[in-house]
Amino acid sequence: MANRVTRTRFALIVLLLIGLHFYVRPRLWDPRIAPDFLMLALMIYAIRTRTGNAAVAGFIVGIASDALTPVRFGAGALAHTLVGYLAAWGRAVFFADNLLVHAGFIGAGVWLRDVVVLVSSGAGGRRIFLHLVTWSPLQAISTAVAGVIILIIFREWLAIRLDE
C-alpha cells in the first residue's frame, strides 16, 4: 500500500511539473533562461530509479520536447536519454543526500543536455560557445533553484532525506 501511495504522490508531482512547464514557464522570463520543468521531472525520477528506467524516461521526455522543435528532431531524445542514464548511474555511484549536491546535479544535467542538443543538432561553433557560456548556465541555475524548491516542498512525498 505504501508503494502505491508513493507512486501516486510522485505522479502528482510530475503532473505539477508538466503543468508548470507548459503554463508557467512561458510566462516567466526569456525561454532560454526559464527553468526547464520537464528536465527537472526527469532528474527527480532519474535519482530515484535504475539506469534503464531513467534512460527510457529520458527518451520519452526527449521525444516530447522534440515534438515542439521539429527542426532538430532526435537531438533532444538523444540528449535526454543520455542525461537520464547518466543521472541514474551517477546517483548510484557517488550521490549524497545533500540539498546542494541535488542542486548541482540538476544544474549539471541541464547543462549537459544543452551540450548534447547543440552538438548533435549541427549548430555552428560560435553559436554553441555563446549558448554554453551564457544561456545554458543561466537556465541550469534557474532549473536547479526550482528543483531545490520542489525538493524542499515535497520532501516527504518524494521520500528523500536531505541533509542541509
Image (cartoon, helix red, strand yellow):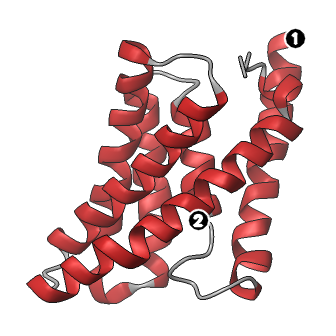
Mark nearest the camera among 1 and 2 is 2
Looking at this view, is 163 or 95 the one in front? 163
Instruction: Look at the image and tell me whether residue 74 can be seen.
Output: no
Q: Residue lying furthest front in this view?
A: 164
The C terminus is located in which quarter? top right
Looking at this view, is 22 or 27 the one in front? 27
How many residues crowd mark 1 within 10 Å: few (<14), some (14–19), many (20+)? Answer: few
Instruction: Look at the image and tell me whether residue 116 can be seen.
Output: yes
Task: Give the quarter of the image for residue 77.
Answer: bottom left
Q: Earlier in the sequence, mark 1 or mark 2?
A: 1
Looking at this view, is 107 or 120 the one in front? 107
Q: Which residue is mark 2?
A: 36
In the visual, does 94 lie left or right of 155? left
The N terminus is located in which quarter? top right
Q: Residue at x 79, y 66 (%)?
A: 19
Circle on res. 2: 1
Q: Is residue 34 above or below residue 100?
A: below
Please, what secondary structure does the residue beneath circle 2 have?
loop
Where residue 55 appears, x then y in whole percent?
Answer: 38, 39
Disc 2 residue type (three-letter): Asp
Where residue 36 appears, x then y in whole percent?
Answer: 59, 65
